[in-house]
Image: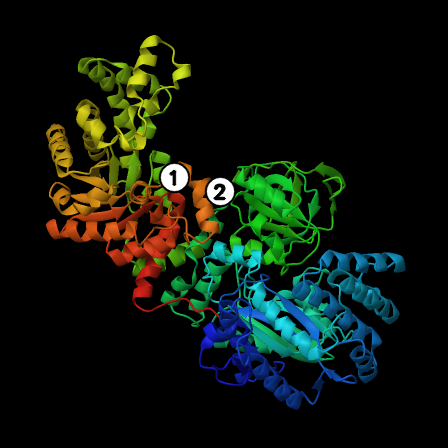
Amino acid sequence: MRYVYDFDEDAGGGRELLGGKGIGLAEMTQLAIPVPAGFTITTDACRAYMAAGGDVPEGLDAEVEQHVAALEERTGKRFGDPHDPLLVSVRSGAAVSMPGMMDTILNLGLNDVAVEGLTESTGNARFAFDSYRRLVQMYGEVVDGVDGQRFEQALTDLKAARGVKQDVDLSAADLRELVATFLGIYEDATGSPFPQDATEQLRRAYRAVFDSWDAPRAQVYRRTYDIPEDLGTAVNVVQMVFGNRGERSCTGVCFTRDPATGERRLYGEFLQNAQGEDVVAGIRTPEPIERMADLMPEVFQELVDTLDRLEAHYRDVQDIEFTVEEGTLYLLQTRTGKRTARAALRIAAEMVEEGLISREEAVARIDPAQLDQLLHPMLDPDAEFDVAAKGLNASPGAAVGAIALDAETAEGRARAGEEVILVRWETTPDDIHGIVPENTKGILTAHGGMTSHAAVVARGMGKTCVAGCEGLRIDLSSRTVTIGGRELAEGDVITLEGSEGWVIVGAVPLVPPAIDENFGILLGWADEVRRLRVRANADTPEDAAKAREFGAEGIGLCRTEHMFMAEGRLEIVREMIMAREEEERRAALDRLLPMQQADFEGIFEAMAGLPVTIRLLDPPLHEFLPPLEEATSDAMRDRIRHLHEANPMLGTRGCRLGLQFPEIYEMQVRAIVRAARAVAERTGEAPLVEIMHPLVGFREELARLRELTERVAAEEPSVEYLCGTMIELPRAALRADEIAEEADFFSFGTNDLTQTALGFSRDDAEGKFLTYYLEHGILERNPFEVLDEDGVGDLMRIAVERGRGARPQIKLGICGEHGGEPRSVAFCHRLGLDYVSCSPYRVPLARLAAAQAALAEAGVTALVIGG
């Protein structure tokens, strides 16, 4: 098997073989865009390496040597030459972009002798020793696991001793001294001197990049973004070009459009006399890309022209890394640019206007989960506050939380339910576990720019980020920070406003954001192509109105038990439960009826003309009573004991409750039909009423409850309605043909169906054994978040086939929260359901996911470039 390909060779395997960086470098080479020479070690080699337990596959080392020889011939330099050495970088590049998660090493090929040769051949001792000190640090950290803080501390100490602030202010003699210090740190940490053989350096480097695929930070990132574990990474070996050769050299990162707003303008940063890692690592605060037009006008125009070509070729925003070496431009990478949701919508809409892409392609490109960003809160415009400090507006939105000064603290507090802001000098990929939790609301850093690790990761996750805040000081020894001159302790609350880059001491009230016109445009295009209808789970008129605002086409689940908990009603409900005789229960229910009717009228009016599915009382009665120790009478204590069940989730609830106490369901049906008639008379538009009986497992259960429903509804003969059930028990799915004979519709209650099918109690699984299952790979995904297609999904398939076999026109939907999860929505589309239903704020996600499912079926998918 062949494992290595030059950039100008046709490998035939695409990004899956060459990885994102490799395929980008190969395609740019074919487009005659200035790219340094080099070659790619494929993902096949990485997978073979992992399968062999860390042994390099046979023939790989020899193949690499052949390609190094070809690179030497092309460049006219020799790898390991003591006088004018060929130097290379080694960079990871997975098929799926994982920014900052794996490793890079620059300047491979330098050693104690070659650094002197490089000094002589370039006439630039400062450049040569700056390159060597970078190699020793990167190689030590990546290949041998040397603590990077030891190198950083030595650099900080030297700058302090010389009275300078920036690395570029150190002289050649200073850097020569620093190299000696770094070599000593390396030998002290590893027990061996720094390797002097260039071939050994290269071999150990690409093994280390293979190993970085399984680094903890990379594993966390893959779990977060659902990236398969077995893809592996490619390794790109690239001729070094140097942005640190003086004032006519620079390195930078640039997007073809603004990734925060979507505006059609160059967006990026660069550093003169620097190497690429300085920009993305946030080691120095870079300058905006526009400044390059003043300093290097000809090179800047070449960069602009090149970026225009790349965007036109790939028909999407490109994120590129570049280096200018003594006035000559080189591109080191191009990939699809990550962007905020607001930017993604604007870019997609404008690219359709520009004729670059079709409407269908625009819809396919938007990540449904990313739309959550547009629903994040913003600062209350009426709130009064003082901005304590200002940084770069790295990721939009507003966030309030307690200060956490390291990833471990952030993760612990966030998982305990506290909202936190991770505050760091600068983040690194190793901080990922503190950034991922939902309750980590934002990131604040003292260093770094708009393309630093913190900024890129925050934008991708939809979290607020303020980077490069000069007014921030951190003292880890005392666990305190100073923001704009004010000292705060870890745990104190701050507010971030990521769109402006503001840092505010204390909590500022937040409000939901306004959604711009591009949101409506893209979702309108999505609605044109989707087949699945999208409803909302809503229990109040306010929820129903919000759902309709987000484009819901009805209510798929209205839970009536929440109404029983409202103020002024719980006492009546308890009175009903405490009643010993049916007559007493009916008297209490008669008092509840007008309250229930008013609830339903409000919901029917909010959803005028759209279907509303109302689930009759589901939970067991004891949930409406206080704990035994809080009972106020002996009679209540006796009733609580009588209603106690060992496993109430599988006890007297749902239809079982309605069959034993039919007067409860009679009251609810009566309230529903009276409300429907009242709204029809008031508005002239009859509601589309669907009455749903929960937890049915047997045909006879639904047959008796349908008879009850029809008998009571006959009191209002002008009201049309459907009568159906939730499918939330495995038996109901298996006997769906029998149950369908009594049902006008099925709604899959996948929250409970997942519990009953898997034998998992959600309350006992999450945070306990389910966490272990996910961390140890027993399960790939949390089945309460992403539908278990093989198990629960198979039950749904059976129910659909048998239900429609018995009643071809039966209406089928889903009302568990899976109805707003994109992969689960796609499954529902393939299954042929009529609608999905989810919480109001997930309705836009479901609309987009339903459209993308239809487009995927038609062969239209998103295009992704680079890695």
User: Which secondary structure, mark 2?
Assistant: loop
State which mark lies toward you, 1 or 2.
Answer: 1
| Residue 57 located left or right of residue 250 | left
Alpha carbon separation for disc pair 1 and 2: 30 Å
Quarter-wise, where is residue 510 in the image?
top right
Across and down, in percent, residue 651 comes to 27, 30
Q: In front: 269, or 674?
A: 269
Three-letter code for the amino acid on which mark 1 is drawn: Arg
Up/down of 221 relative to 588, above or below? below
Three-letter code for the amino acid on which mark 2 is drawn: Pro
Q: In front: 144, or 844?
A: 144
Q: Is residue 318 visible?
A: no
The residue carrying pointer 1 sits among few (fewer than 14), some (14 to 19) or many (20 or more) residues within 10 Å by Cα, namely some
Residue 163 - label: none
Up/down of 42 relative to 146, above or below? below
Task: Please identify the residue farthest to the top as the structure is shown.
Answer: 634
Say whether disc 1 or disc 2 marks the residue closer to the N-terminus.
2
Up/down of 343 relative to 866, above or below? above
Across and down, in percent, residue 147 comes to 71, 57
The residue carrying pointer 2 sits among few (fewer than 14), some (14 to 19) or many (20 or more) residues within 10 Å by Cα, namely some
Quarter-wise, where is residue 319 in the image?
bottom right
Across and down, in percent, residue 145 comes to 67, 61
Q: Is residue 166 visible?
A: yes
Residue 762 - label: 1
Q: Write down the residue under mark 2.
A: 512
Across and down, in percent, residue 488 comes to 71, 37
